[in-house]
Image (cartoon, grey):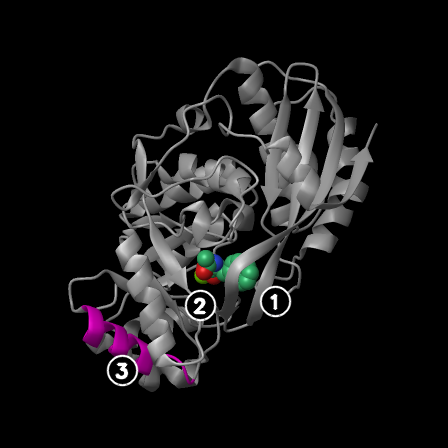
């Protein structure tokens, strides 16, 4: 890849209404406050979506903070680095501590521009081997069990290959039991606690062992990796880490210490697609299966996630759902489910770009950062 000059970086804020409120152990959202990054180069323009949410509840990063750190700290370092390829972005941004979601968005915008200019698809650049990605759906906490069952019935009807229930203390064993009771033992089922439990809940979480779950995702605090190792010794249900896996090194240590036997990979959480591929490789070498997480991305983030999720060690169904799971109107051409899977884009770069009129309609703010 030939290094390119980044002429300007544009930050765009988009407000996307969700088709239904999404409730997790950390709150309810009715909209997705999306930060997009557009890299202007002579050859092509690159697009990326920052996964940070509007509030610092899933992670310490949040959209407005990511916006400021990109404009004030990351992009000036990118300009100072001169001509770059995507592989040179992380080293250029390395002096800035943390802010992986912000860094991921900057690197991905450069990567998309570079690949679009070269006419190479992201999936080919990453070494993907699958043409389609099996699609699961993440189901929020509901007000009642009947409402939950109605929601799950709709997703199974639509063809989703796996159901993930969001859980929290007070909404865990009963919804899992009800879903098993109603839909049987054959559906693929897993749960995600978004760190809502403590080590003292081990005995309670053992009650989930009878429901043949694929995994329990991030039961404890993101910093309590040792607690997950302790919990893993007490549960039969496999532990999968999400929030705790912030890098390939973190994945290596979590696996080595027995804190997880499955890993959720979100490129934004680990600082970009290049680090995400390293997480994939570390897990593959350890015989640990991985799957692609989701952050309620628009088509921009979803397209790139599909390319990554097509790598060989992504062997469990993804959280990459069809556009209409979250949005009546996506920013790109909609991604559709067929036979429980979604096609990986084949066009150059991430394979998509925002539809200009739709972007214009949903845009709430923008900032152009120049050298
Ligand atoms: C997870 N994602 O795996 C995240 C958490 C998440 C698909 O379950 C608005 C409200 C946006 C809550 C994005 C899924 C969100 C959100 C991601 C939760 O932990
Ligand atoms: Mg999760």
- Name which of mark 3 and mark 2 comes first in the sequence: 2
Where does residue 66 sit, x and y in percent of width and height?
A: 70, 50
Tell me the residue that label 2 is attached to: 140
Q: Which stretch did the figure color magenta? A: 170-183
Gap in angstroms between the C-alphas marked 3 and 2: 21 Å
Residue 324, horizontal then vertical, whole percent = 45, 49
Q: Does the magenta stretch include residue 178?
A: yes
Circle 3 packing at 10 Å, graded few (<14), some (14-19), many (20+), is few
Tag of residue 207: 3
- Residue 269 is left or right of residue 128, and the answer is right
Mark positioned earlier in the residue sequence (1 or 2): 1
Which is in the foreground here, disc 1 or disc 2? 2
Which residue carries the number 1 mark?
Answer: 57
Would you say the beta carbon of the disc 2 residue lies within 8 angstroms of ligand 1? yes
Element under label 1? loop
The spot of residue 81 in percent (x, y) is: 74, 26
Judge whether 203 appears above or below 263 on screen: below
How far apart are the two marked residues, 1 and 2, measured between alpha carbons? 16 Å
Measuring from the top left, give residue 35's x and y in whole percent: 66, 46
Relative placement, left or right, of 217 versus 157 is right
Quadrant position of residue 140: bottom left
The residue lying at 43 percent from left, 44 percent from top is 279
Disc 3 is placed on an element classified as helix
């Amino acid at each position: 890849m030939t290094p390119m000059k980044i002429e300007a970086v544009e930050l765009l804020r988009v407000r996307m209404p969700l088709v239904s409120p999404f409730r997790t152990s950390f709150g309810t959202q009715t909209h997705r406050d999306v930060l997009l990054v557009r890299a202007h180069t002579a050859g092509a323009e690159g697009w990326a979506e920052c996964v940070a949410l509007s509030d610092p509840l899933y992670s310490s990063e949040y959209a407005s903070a990511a916006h400021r750190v990109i404009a004030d700290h990351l992009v000036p370092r990118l300009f100072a680095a001169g001509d770059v390829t995507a592989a040179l972005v992380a080293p250029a941004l390395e002096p800035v501590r943390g802010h992986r979601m912000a860094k991921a968005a900057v690197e991905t915008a450069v990567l998309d521009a570079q690949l679009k200019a070269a006419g190479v698809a992201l999936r080919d650049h990453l070494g993907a081997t699958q043409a389609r990605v099996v699609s699961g759906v993440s189901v929020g906490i509901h007000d009642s069990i009947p409402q939950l069952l109605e929601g799950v019935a709709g997703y199974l009807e639509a063809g989703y290959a796996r159901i993930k229930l969001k859980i929290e203390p007070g909404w865990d064993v009963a919804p899992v039991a009800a879903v098993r009771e109603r839909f049987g033992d054959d559906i693929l089922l897993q749960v995600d606690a978004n760190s809502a439990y403590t080590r003292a809940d081990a005995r309670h979480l053992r009650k989930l062992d009878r429901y043949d779950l694929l995994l329990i995702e991030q039961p404890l605090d993101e910093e309590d990796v040792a607690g997950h190792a302790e919990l893993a010794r007490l549960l039969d249900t496999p532990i999968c880490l999400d929030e705790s896996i912030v890098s390939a090194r973190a994945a290596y240590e979590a696996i080595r210490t027995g804190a997880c036997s499955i890993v959720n990979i979100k490129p934004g959480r680990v600082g970009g697609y290049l680090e995400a591929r390293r997480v994939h490789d570390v897990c593959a070498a350890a015989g640990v299966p991985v799957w692609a997480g989701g952050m309620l991305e628009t088509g921009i983030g979803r397209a790139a996630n599909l390319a990554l999720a097509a790598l060989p060690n992504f062997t469990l169904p993804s959280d990459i759902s069809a556009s209409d799971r979250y949005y009546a109107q996506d920013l790109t051409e909609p991604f559709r489910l067929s036979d429980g899977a979604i096609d990986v884009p084949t066009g150059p770069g991430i394979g998509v770009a925002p539809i200009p009129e739709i972007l214009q309609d949903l845009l709430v703010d923008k900032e152009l950062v120049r050298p």
